């Protein structure tokens, strides 16, 4: 239902026409709409009042329409839809720290500069001489910050016996806080939290610190479900795969058990305690990174600008993929749509750097990460 408020002048004209109809029925001359006519000024004032009332009615009507309601009403809708604004997430990286001739201690909160932002270790780490260990660091700026492999190589503070620090793998890119507009579109698409497989995946994916999630369920009662890449899900079991980190350490379990109760697989777990006191482990799996090779073709007969290969590298390496995503040549070409420094004519992708094709299917428990970009003239 759509309701359009009447403007003050239109309402005044309607009143004037009604009044003149009464005058005509009495054989009296009509009045003219001029500022010099006191009755017309009264009609304008009444028209303004009618417009204000119509606007309130329209607002009330629109509040039941997701496409037309204002942002505050969208926020009001979310609890009724079983969801809320999805919080942003910080980009995270896994650092590899190498000790030298003596014991190395890197305290929690140690800073690694990266361009205009900083990454900070979420915990401390102590290593013996010649030891190698890993620690997670989070960006201090909310939202998507793309970090390639081996980009974080120094702390802002020196530590005795530190030989090196780096991030061997690309970071897990964060996300911005969801806006009412984003929530509006999600509600219209029907992507709200629900008591089903889609609902639990959306709910876990919305946890602060987690940037992507896949939840698989094996509906078979006897046979394993084997995912792309070989990971098996037991009969009537669920497999939760996440990218990022549940910084609370408990929300994966509480979110899952609030929406599903099937046993879970995975090499990590969180405990959930029911009101009865019964404790159940909720297992999950952190997504691996799967190298992606990309080959981009450009037209040798068309003009090119200096440094265009580097520009293509930067665009492709900034792409963010989802767990188990199918990456196609269209995915790559869309990222380069409108590229001016060269005429792009196609692309190929590969998961081994040897066999290239129009598309590749990432493992069900892996996130594709661009490893190499080759630019080829044809």
Image (cartoon, grey):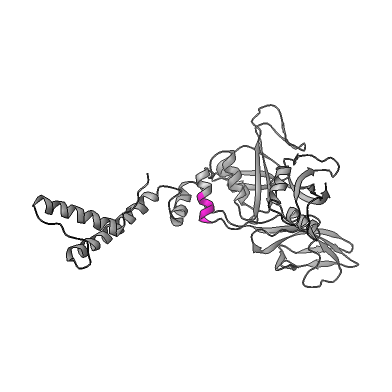
Image point 26% across, 59% down: which residue?
47
Determine which quarter of the picture holds residue 87. Answer: bottom right
Q: Is residue 9 positioned above or below 191 on the image?
A: below
Is 17 situated left or right of 262 in this image? left
**Secondary structure predominantly adopted by residues drawn in magenta:** helix
Which residues fall within the magenta stretch? 179-184
Is 103 situated left or right of 115 in this image? right
Image point 43% across, 52% down: which residue?
69
Residue 13, visible in the rendered structure: yes
Is 335 situated left or right of 294 in this image? left
Disc count in the image? 0
The foreground one among 103 and 121 is: 121
Report x, y in % for residue 263.
64, 38
Residue 40 on the magenta segment: no
Q: Quadrant of the N terminus?
A: top left
- Toward the top, the furthest residue is 222
The foreground one among 130 and 320 is: 320
Q: Is residue 214 positioned above or below 303 on the image?
A: above
Residue 285, visible in the rendered structure: no
Image point 28% across, 56% down: which residue?
10
Report x, y in % for residue 17.
20, 53
Report x, y in % for residue 188.
50, 45
Report x, y in % for residue 209.
64, 55
Q: Is residue 195 positioned above or below 48 on the image?
A: above
Is 351 situated left or right of 92 in this image? right
The foreground one among 337 and 138 is: 337
- Toward the right, the furthest residue is 101
């Amino acid at each position: 239902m759509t309701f359009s408020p009447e403007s003050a002048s239109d309402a005044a004209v309607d009143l004037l026409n009604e009044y003149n109809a009464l005058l005509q029925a009495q054989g009296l001359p009509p009045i003219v709409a001029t500022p010099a006519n006191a009755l017309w000024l009264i009609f304008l004032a009444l028209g303004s009042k009618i417009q204000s009332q119509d606007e309130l009615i329209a607002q009330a009507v629109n509040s039941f329409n997701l496409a037309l309601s204002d942002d505050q009403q969208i926020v009001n809708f979310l609890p009724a839809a079983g969801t809320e604004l999805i919080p942003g997430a910080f980009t995270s990286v896994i650092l590899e720290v190498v000790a030298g001739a003596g014991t190395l201690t890197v305290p929690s909160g140690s800073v690694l500069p990266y361009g205009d932002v900083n990454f900070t270790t979420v915990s401390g780490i102590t290593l013996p001489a010649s030891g190698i260990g890993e620690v997670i660091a989070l960006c201090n700026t909310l939202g998507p910050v793309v970090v390639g492999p081996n980009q974080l190589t120094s702390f802002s503070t020196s530590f005795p016996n530190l030989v090196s620090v780096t991030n061997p793998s690309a970071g897990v890119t964060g996300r911005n806080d969801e806006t009412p507009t984003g929530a509006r579109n999600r509600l219209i698409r029907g992507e709200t939290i629900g008591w089903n497989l889609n609902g639990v995946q959306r709910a876990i994916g919305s946890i602060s610190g987690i940037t992507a999630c896949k939840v698989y369920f094996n509906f078979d009662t006897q046979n394993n479900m084997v995912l792309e890449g070989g990971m098996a899900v037991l009969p009537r079991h669920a497999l939760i795969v996440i990218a990022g980190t549940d910084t609370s350490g408990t929300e994966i379990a509480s979110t899952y058990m609030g929406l599903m109760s099937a046993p879970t697989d995975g090499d990590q777990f969180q405990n959930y305690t029911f009101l009865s006191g019964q404790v159940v482990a909720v297992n999950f799996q952190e997504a691996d990174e799967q190298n992606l090779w990309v080959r981009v073709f450009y037209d040798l007969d068309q003009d090119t600008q200096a440094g265009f290969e580097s520009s293509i590298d930067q665009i492709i390496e900034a792409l963010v993929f989802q767990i188990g995503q199918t990456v196609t040549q269209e995915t790559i070409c869309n990222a380069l749509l409108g590229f001016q420094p060269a005429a792009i004519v196609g692309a190929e992708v590969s998961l081994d750097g040897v066999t290239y094709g129009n598309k590749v299917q990432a493992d069900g428990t892996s996130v594709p990460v661009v490893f190499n970009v080759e630019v080829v003239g044809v």
